[in-house]
Image (cartoon, rainbow, N blue to C red):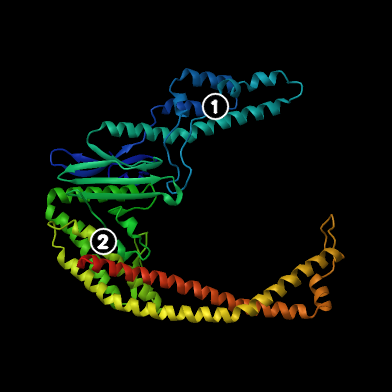
């Protein structure tokens, strides 16, 4: 195990895998590191030397690979994600055909009179380079794969870092409904993720405070994890530390565990919601862990933000209710309900204003559209006419030279002075027309969002009242 002196030299999933281990005497967790060692290191290094050695022949390399029975195994499928956040990852088995690949020297002997010795050497070296790259690309993935196997055999290791492609959700069950999972989906582009998830008393622990700290947080994402991690190999250390802290606190003092991971999350979310109602300047958490201040200067955007966060909190109430009997939840729920009663009339008032603006905008478009359509048709007619004339006065030249070409814009404007009058008028009207259309789309989006917020609040209280 690395010491404090050399721990900074560790590269997770490159030099070592980071592991979560359990001390069975007291059931506490701790972090350790397992070196990534390729079991065929000696054979690979010898192969690399042969491929790089100028004097070596392809037949010599072929014989060496055949003699070392373990070497061909590295050419099989390997579950390895080179870039955790990118799509189309993994290393497929090589389609290397020994007979055709290494037969190049024999083939060349038949055509020595036509191929120079230098050409032969170049072709052979290209084959060596291809072989070298093929094995080097699989070196680390193969070593990782064997390290996983070693970790799986160690009963003290309950979780280890990996670079496997696709879904993976190994779980560590401590007892009494306590479960720790590392949920990963590496190598699937925008669908990739890396989560830690805690379950206590068979209830998922949800990071409710993320709803406040992250402005673009999605409810459906938050309820899937307890902690979200960057898609980096280094993030495995954060994930393991999160798991170790949770396990050890649970083992040391279950009450403090409940306070930190359940009670404080509820408390922070509700306090954050109350702050949102009263303020317009917020510190949002960035995904690198820092905070950035943001000020809402637009009243409607601020109301929308408040409506989204406060009405959205109602969706979390079912999750909060799961902790009934574990913590006192009534105060949290009543405060969330109070905030929704405050925001509801504000949302309805703003929605009524938005509907009036939509109607006014629609009337403006109706009044403006005939002029726009007329100018649009004229613009298209002139443009097509100008293009036809351009083909006549400027026939295509083979050399695509501009020499001798007629300036079609000048030519057309001199003969049709009304052309630019129509064009300029069309651009002027088009700018206003599209601005009205854009405003209409924006207002419709606001109307949909505000309606959704209002219906969410209405549905909650109607359901609670039994209607």
| Quadrant position of residue 464 | bottom left
Q: Going 29% across and 54% down the picture, which residue do you hit? A: 227
* Residue 57 visible to an observer of this rendering: no
Location of the N terminus (image quadrant): top left
Q: Which residue lies furthest to the front in this view?
A: 467
Whether tag 1 and tag 2 are in contact, CB under 8 A, the answer is no
Location of the C terminus (image quadrant): bottom left
Q: Position of residue 23 (x, y in %)?
A: 17, 39
402 displayed left or right of 290: right
Q: Mark 2 points at which residue?
A: 316
Q: Where is residue 38 in the image (x, y as percent from the top left)?
A: 39, 31
Q: Name the residue under label 1.
A: 96
How far apart are the alpha carbons under marks 1 and 2?
A: 55 Å
Is the residue 466 above or below the residue 172 in the image?
A: below
Q: Position of residue 17 (x, y in %)?
A: 33, 40
Which numbered dot is residue 44?
none
| Quadrant position of residue 39 | top left
| Quadrant position of residue 53 | top right
């Amino acid at each position: 195990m690395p010491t404090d002196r050399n721990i900074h030299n560790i590269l997770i999933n490159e030099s070592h895998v980071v592991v979560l281990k359990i001390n069975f005497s007291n059931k506490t967790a701790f972090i350790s590191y397992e070196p990534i060692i390729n079991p065929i290191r000696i054979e690979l290094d010898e192969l690399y030397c042969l491929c790089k050695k100028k004097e070596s022949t392809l037949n010599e390399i072929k014989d060496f690979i055949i003699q070392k029975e373990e070497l061909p195994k590295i050419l099989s499928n390997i579950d390895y994600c080179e870039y955790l956040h990118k799509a189309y990852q993994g290393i497929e088995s090589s389609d290397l055909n020994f007979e055709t690949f290494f037969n190049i020297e024999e083939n060349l002997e038949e055509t020595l009179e036509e191929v120079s010795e230098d050409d032969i050497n170049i072709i052979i070296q290209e084959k060596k380079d291809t072989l070298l790259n093929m094995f080097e690309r699989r070196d680390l993935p193969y070593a990782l794969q064997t390290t996983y196997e070693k970790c799986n055999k160690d009963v003290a290791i309950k979780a280890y870092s990996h670079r496997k492609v696709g879904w993976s959700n190994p779980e560590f069950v401590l007892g009494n409904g306590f479960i720790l999972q590392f949920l990963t989906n590496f190598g699937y582009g925008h669908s990739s993720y890396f989560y830690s998830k805690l379950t206590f008393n068979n209830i998922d622990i949800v990071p409710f405070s993320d709803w406040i700290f992250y402005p673009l947080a999605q409810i459906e994402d938050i309820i899937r994890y307890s902690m979200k991690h960057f898609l980096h190999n280094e993030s495995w250390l954060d994930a393991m530390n999160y798991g170790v802290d949770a396990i050890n606190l649970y083992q040391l003092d279950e009450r403090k565990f409940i306070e930190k991971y359940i009670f404080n999350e509820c408390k922070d979310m509700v306090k954050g919601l109350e702050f949102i109602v009263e303020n317009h300047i917020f510190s949002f958490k960035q995904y690198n862990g820092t905070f950035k201040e943001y000020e809402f200067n637009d009243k409607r955007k601020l109301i929308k933000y408040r409506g989204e966060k406060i009405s959205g909190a109602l969706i979390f109430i079912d999750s909060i209710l799961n902790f009934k009997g574990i913590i006192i939840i009534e105060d949290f729920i009543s405060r969330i309900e109070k905030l929704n009663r405050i925001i509801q009339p504000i949302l309805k008032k703003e929605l009524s204003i938005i509907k009036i603006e939509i109607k006014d905008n629609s009337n403006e478009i109706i009044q403006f559209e005939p002029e726009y359509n007329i100018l649009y048709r004229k613009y298209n007619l002139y443009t097509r006419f100008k293009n036809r004339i351009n083909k006549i006065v400027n026939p295509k030249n083979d050399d695509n030279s501009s020499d001798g070409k007629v300036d079609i814009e000048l030519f057309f404007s001199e003969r049709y002075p009304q052309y630019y009058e129509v064009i300029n008028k069309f651009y002027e009207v088009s700018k206003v027309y599209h601005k009205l259309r854009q405003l209409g789309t924006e207002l419709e989006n606001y109307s949909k969002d505000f309606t959704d917020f209002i219906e969410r609040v209405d549905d909650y209280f109607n359901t609670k009242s039994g209607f």
